[in-house]
Image: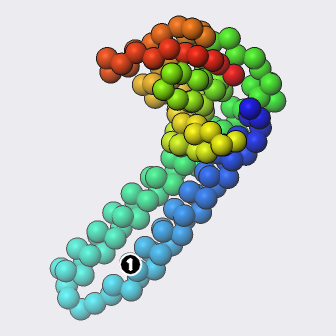
Amino acid sequence: MNKTELIKLISQKLSEKIQNFEKLIAETRASNNDTKSSMGDKYETGREMLQQEINNLQVQLNEVLKQQDFLKTSFDKLRMTKKFDKVEKGAIVKTERGLFFISVSLGEVIFENQKIICISPESPLAKAMNGKQKGEVFSLNNMSQKIVDIQ
C-alpha cells in the first residue's frame, strides 16, 4: 500500500473540509448581516444565534486545520518508509474487523479499493492497539480483536 498516496488523499479530504467550513462561515456571516430589522429583541436573539453558529463552525474549522498541520508535520519521509513491527502513529493496522490508519480522525476513506478507517492516535481504539504486535489481541468495549498485519 502506497502511504504517500494515502496521505495525499487524506490531505485533499482535509482541504475540502476546510473549504466547506470557510464557505459556511462566510455564508452565515452574510446572512447575519441580512437580518437587520426593527423587531427589537427578536432581531438580537436571531443575531446571537447566528453568531453562536459562526463560533461553532470556527471551532470545527480550527480542529480540521490542526489535523492538517499534524498530518504535515508528523508524516515525513522516515515515517512513510518505516517498517512497523508494533502499532504506533503512522501504522496501518489490519485487524479481523477492518483496516485502520493511525493518523488523523477523518473516518472512512476508500483507497486502492479498500475501506480504511483513519483514526487519531488519541482515540480509544488507537490507544487500545498501541504497542501491540502482529498476532496480538486487544480489547475495547468488551470486544476483542486480533492484529492480523501492521504496515
Q: Position of residue 51 (x, y in %)?
A: 36, 67
Q: Position of residue 107 (x, y in %)?
A: 51, 42
Q: Is residue 5 left or right of residue 39?
A: right
Q: Which residue is drawn at 36% across and 64% down?
A: 53
Q: Which amino acid does label 1 sit on?
A: Asn
Vertical placement of residue 27 versus 73, above or below:
below
**Between 8 and 70, which is closer to the camera in this rendering?**
8
Tell which residue pokes out farthest to the bottom in this image.
38
Q: Quadrant of residue 36?
A: bottom left
Q: Which residue is drawn at 48% across and 26% down?
A: 97
Q: How many marks?
A: 1
Q: Position of residue 35 (x, y in %)?
A: 33, 84
Q: Which residue is drawn at 39% across and 86% down?
A: 34
Quarter in which the N terminus is drawn: top right
Residue 30 visible (yes or no): yes
Q: Is residue 101 left or right of residue 60?
A: right
Residue at numbered disc 1: 32
Residue 104 visible (yes or no): no
Please tell me how crowded label 1 is: few (under 14), some (14-19), or many (20+) other residues with Cα within 10 Å: some
Q: Is residue 111 left or right of residue 131?
A: right
State the SS at label 1.
helix
Vertical placement of residue 49 versus 56, above or below:
below
Q: In which quarter of the image is residue 149?
A: top right
Vertical placement of residue 34 versus 13, above or below:
below
Q: In this view, does 108 lie to the left or right of 34?
A: right
**Between 2 and 90, which is closer to the camera in this rendering?**
2
Q: Which residue is drawn at 52% across and 29% down?
A: 98
Quarter in which the C terminus is drawn: top right
Q: Where is residue 22 in the image (x, y as percent from the top left)?
A: 55, 65
Vertical placement of residue 113 versus 119, above or below:
below
